[in-house]
Amino acid sequence: LYHFTKLIVMSGGQMRRLSIALEALTRPHNLFLDEPTSGLDAESALQVMYFLKRYVRAAPHRRVILTIHQPSSFIWKEIDNIALLAKGTLVYQGPRTHMESFFDFAGYPTPAEYNPADHYVTVVNDDFGNHKMSVDEWGQTFTEFEARTTKDDGNCRTMGSFKYRSSWINTRTKDEIETQRAGPVQATAELTKRYFRNLFFNPGILGTRIAMYSMLALMVGSLFWDLGNRHDFASIQSRTAILFYCVAFFIFMSIAVLPFTVMEKSIVDKEVRNSYYHPAIYQVAQGIASIPGTAILSFLVTLVIITLTKLKEPLWYFITMFLSLLCGEALAQLVSHIVPHFVIGMAIVAGLYGFFMLFMGFMLVPSEFPDWLSWTYYVGMQTYSWRVFMYTEFCCDDEQVWGDDENSTFKTGTDVLEFYEIENVNRGSDLIVLICYCLFIHTMSCVVLHLRYTMFRSKIGEIEETKSEPAPETAPETALETAPDAVQDAKSSNKTSLKGYS
């Protein structure tokens, strides 16, 4: 329990190091990191850099691209190649070991006992007018320095018009490390395991729903105590009311899963875009993982309501409630893949459930629907749950006399079913419809996820980045890069930055 508690309350630094380890597990050739040492103490930050250095040298063709704010002198020595930018102007580009020569050439050598990185970023930053040279003058000075630099270091390679030292030169004699992704079965199993582990560490996710369902079931059972032993006209109304409530509200409460699926979207986005698994695998795992939870909820509702009300055939009640909740959770998952925020998703799901409940045959029988709306009776999952519940309670018992007098509208249970136009219902067929309904929604979720990460991949990425990462204010920054293309991209930014190549 102590270890579980420590895992739940991981610090920001621990979470940052964990995220780096998760990315390194798949052994990518190009590893991009954004401020991996921020929030870490000096020793932890240095150990992260040591790890990245070892990672680069463990196999050929590996590169680490990262940004760092205010690197210590120890961290500075772990950087191989640098690109220094100021307001989009290239101030320096090349090996870290040659950088001091450039600043000495420009007339700004590093003072004794100064951290070189702090000195370099400070002298090229003219935001506050404390330095004689402007950014354009620094750029011109570097051009002149490049032109005068003609000798090559034996352990340097030339790329374009500058020289850079690369850590992977030391790995040319090492064998390539083969990487592979988990297969569909293994990925599904791991995602399902992660879902249950998340429930274990966050018991409130399922515990809150268990408390809600149990409390409402207890209230329903108390209100309709011993209803199954009554057969007067009022009991007919009570039975139809309680069955409608169970179908409508208990399925409606499956909307509670939507916030958790939406909050997990950022994690899934990262994993799918890194090709950890196909998005359909995630949906399959979600569908499998939802089965135990819905089974528990269905069992509790059946146990409480059937025990207190004495309604008929608890097994049919459980199976119907179980399949209905599976359909409800599948619909919530589908909507969560479409909407950007769970509040919007909850509004959409609530609207759909309101539509389904209106046309399920309780408030108005199908024959009284307008012709142009007759199709709506067969659309909602609640229709089939309601029909199974009603047929189970009122069918096959014509010897039982219902009503309090001879003028009662309903003499038998069949009369009740005929009134709601469900006397010819086949319960088995309706349950099969619910199963197909659930599978169809999950299939639609797979299609939506596939389209989201293929046809609309870049567009969604731009939208998410715009929302989640507002433009930073102008400020000095240090970065470690590995390709000249990154320098060209960085030239468009209006800030001072230090970039390097490893």
Image: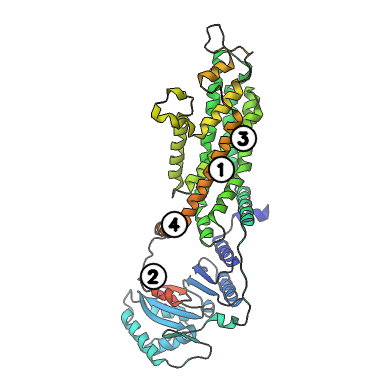
| Neighbourhood count class around disc 4 (C-alpha, 10 Å): few under 14, some 14–19, many 20 upward | few
Distance from the alpha carbon under mark 1 to that under mark 2:
52 Å
Distance from the alpha carbon under mark 4 to that under mark 3:
39 Å
Q: Which residue type does callout 4 highlight?
A: Met
Q: Quadrant of residue 172?
A: bottom right
Residue 420, disc = none
| Neighbourhood count class around disc 1 (C-alpha, 10 Å): few under 14, some 14–19, many 20 upward | some
Disc 3 to disc 2: CB gap under 8 Å: no
Judged by depth in the image, the label closer to the viewer, 3 or 1, is: 1
Mark 1 highlights which residue? 439
Q: Which residue type does callout 3 highlight?
A: Ser
Q: Which of marks 4 and 1 is nearer the N terminus?
A: 1
Mark 2 highlights which residue? 475
Mark 3 highlights which residue? 298
Q: Which residue type does callout 2 highlight?
A: Ala
Judged by depth in the image, the label closer to the viewer, 2 or 4, is: 4
Disc 1 to disc 2: CB gap under 8 Å: no
Disc 3 to disc 1: CB gap under 8 Å: no
Element under disc 4: loop
Mark 4 highlights which residue? 455
Q: In which quarter of the image is residue 490?
A: bottom left
Whether 89 is drawn above or below 375: the answer is below
Pick out the residue farthest to the top: 406
Is 156 placed left or right of 465 in the picture? right
Q: Which of marks 4 and 3 is nearer the N terminus?
A: 3
Instruction: Using the image as rendered, state which of residue 124 and residue 320 is in the foreground.
Output: 320
- Image position, residue 307 (x, y; %): 66, 26
Distance from the alpha carbon under mark 4 to that under mark 1:
24 Å
